[in-house]
Image (cartoon, grey):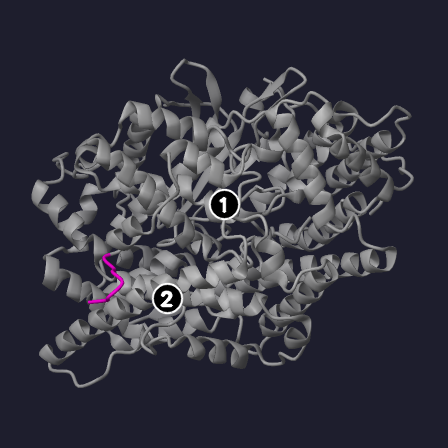
Amino acid sequence: MSNKQNSPLKTLLAAGLAIAIVGCSEKAEEAADTGMTATDETVVEAPVEVADTAPVADNPFLAEWDTPYGIPPFDSIEDGHYRPAFDQGIEELKVDIAAILDNAEEPTFENTFEALELAGPLLSKVMGTFGNISNTDTNDALQELEVEFYPQLTKVRDGIMMDPVLFERVKTVYDTRESLGLDEQEMRLVELYHRDFVRRGAMLDEDTKARVKEINARVSELNTVFGQNLLKQTKSFELLVTDEADLAGLPDNMIGSAKAKAESKGKEGWIFGLDRGTYEGFMTFADNRELRKQLNAGYISRGAQGDEQDNRDVLTEIAKLRAERAQLMGYDNHAAYVLEYNMAKTPEKVESFLAEVWEPGVNKAEQELAEMQQIVQEEGHDFIIEQHDWWYYAEKLRQKKYALDTEVVKPYFEMGNVRDGAFHVANKLFGVTFEPLNDVPVWNPVVQPYAVHDDDGSFLGVFMLDYYARDSKRGGAWMSTYRDSSNVQGKVVRPIVTNNLNVAVPAEGEPTLLTYDQVETLFHEFGHGLHGLLTQARYERFSGTSGTPRDFIEFPSQFMEHYASRPEVLAVYAKHAETGEVIPQELVDKIRAASTHNQGFMTTEYIAASKLDMSWHTMAPNDAASVEDATKFEDEALAAYGKPGEIQSRYRSPYFSHIFAGGYSSGYYAYLWSEILDADGFTAFKETGDIFDPELAARLKENVYQAGGSKDADELYRAFRGQDPEIGPLLEIRGLDQSGP
């Protein structure tokens, strides 16, 4: 197959430069919890005279890849190959852009828009690989390159998007588009590119352009610094336990992993870190209250320790620059700029939506708190529940109310079986099949590659699963692509899609067992993967998750979560790791009965973070400029919302990488907004009496998973559902109602 990589212009314009990272579920969206360096800000210096660049001998990026399916030859790629290949990729992109500018022919769709789509394949080839590897197997050298690459790409982007001659060509075609006989996808490509140029500053005066370029370059630099600071602080923290008695309550597999980690560092005892899985497990099961307090303190103090990795001044400067840039672009604030073409459209609509769910969430949380405080009293304690107690007593409440012990359930969720369960769902819904691949390049021995085929046998793409945690890998769970799909000028290119989790490596010889939350995360990221694999969009600009608004992009992934707990699906994959016994119906009933457990807490902590995001990004420039103390600003903002003190915001600002190092600024609300869609959409299946209803599944496949960003999100949802979504199913699934408890 063709070795063509994703279009640099599409890549540069998309949120999550080059790596096309898509976050995980709202319940487990810690995908960016330990630093995401590719950003919505990261984005081409006006074309300049091209320097002579001699190819570097044996650099794999400068040769055609003869690997199966065009998978990067990971074994041949060394850190030293990225810089020269990147430099040459930049120069080749400039040559391609210069060819468009110097074309003496009248601007046409082909010589302008398709030419932009096809420009600079080497750069995308390099960055598609670099962006992914720097997130899965990073090191000091790659982190240094991040600091160099992303600001440079920002400058390149700005030069292209603000070039007056290029924009005139774009505008000429745009203004005459109705008379050009363009088909639907061609028309959308023209309209989206024109919109991108305008929103990036093509119509600004030269002085304003210059200032916007300065801001973009600085913000890109700060995004990278923020992410790297967070990664360093997260990975450096260690809670060393030396007294075995202090391990009381912790699961055996967690103790074993902590022991192995200590041994790998040459220490006696057990080491617990701050990756989200370890953190939540320790906070849920550790009987030692003081140790829970210590781990929680380490977690929430990241990026705010007064050292060289302190992020408070970094994020404050980002917020100020974003506010200034928004004003220069003609918007009241950064959120207004970001949301203009999302489903929500305005900050006011977001605030109204969050308020609609906030009150029932807080009401439910207060009920949960009262029930947990009763358990504290029943145990003979006299302390008042604090933040570091919530997870622990929420688990006790789960066992009390539903007789559901998560450690009894885990043996039924062996990771390979869960993966196969997700594959089963895709096959039942869409006819998709997954064939294991042997002898293909992988970036780490644990990676599981698959060839994916559609119901008619046609090849859809390569799906590569990297499920295990390691020190060189950022935390959380995410989907990304090494190559996106396209079909331009007769060249059919199918995607290379990845799913990444951070499951603890089990002790040697032991099975990999998942919590149910991890099961949902696997299904969630699988939904993102299907979105990337099934795409039939012609142009990369809206292939898969590309060109899809943030408040729609989580719909295809969160929708898949619903299938994880369905009895007919559990019967396929939930088999005991030792006996092979299918999960008993009694346990299935308990899982479903407990599905709304702790949803008050989950809703409240999530909305608090969403509101914090909006607080940082709805400020006018003067207000933003007056913020001197990030901690004080955050405390005042959270206090104004009336958040219960026992519940901490899911993210504090210094480690809120979604909005300060990722692509979710003014968009963290999107997980919950998309939950309206997935809850309403799955309700449609339940109403048919068949969760695999063929007719509805066909509409979902065509109008969501295959469509990518080829149409407006509202239009795509209505084409699938036949109506606009309603909020009722979301409140029902979360166990909330407008009147509270």
Question: What segment carries the magenta color?
Answer: 735-741
Type of the residue with mark 2: Glu
Q: Is residue 13 left or right of residue 686?
A: right
Relative depth, front residue between 476 and 139? 476
The prevailing secondary structure element of the residues shown in magenta is loop
Disc 1 packing (10 Å; few <14; some 14–19; many ≥20):
many
Q: From the image, which quarter does the N terminus lie in?
A: top right
Whichever of labels 2 and 1 marks the residue nearer the N terminus, that label is 1
Residue 122 percent across, percent down from the top left:
72, 32
Q: Is residue 298 left or right of residue 616?
A: left
**C-alpha separation, residue under disc 2 versus residue under disc 1:** 21 Å
Relative depth, front residue between 346 and 446? 346
Type of the residue with mark 1: Val
Query: Where does label 2 land, which residue?
Result: 605
Q: From the image, which quarter does the C terminus lie in?
A: bottom left
Q: Is residue 732 left or right of residue 542?
A: left
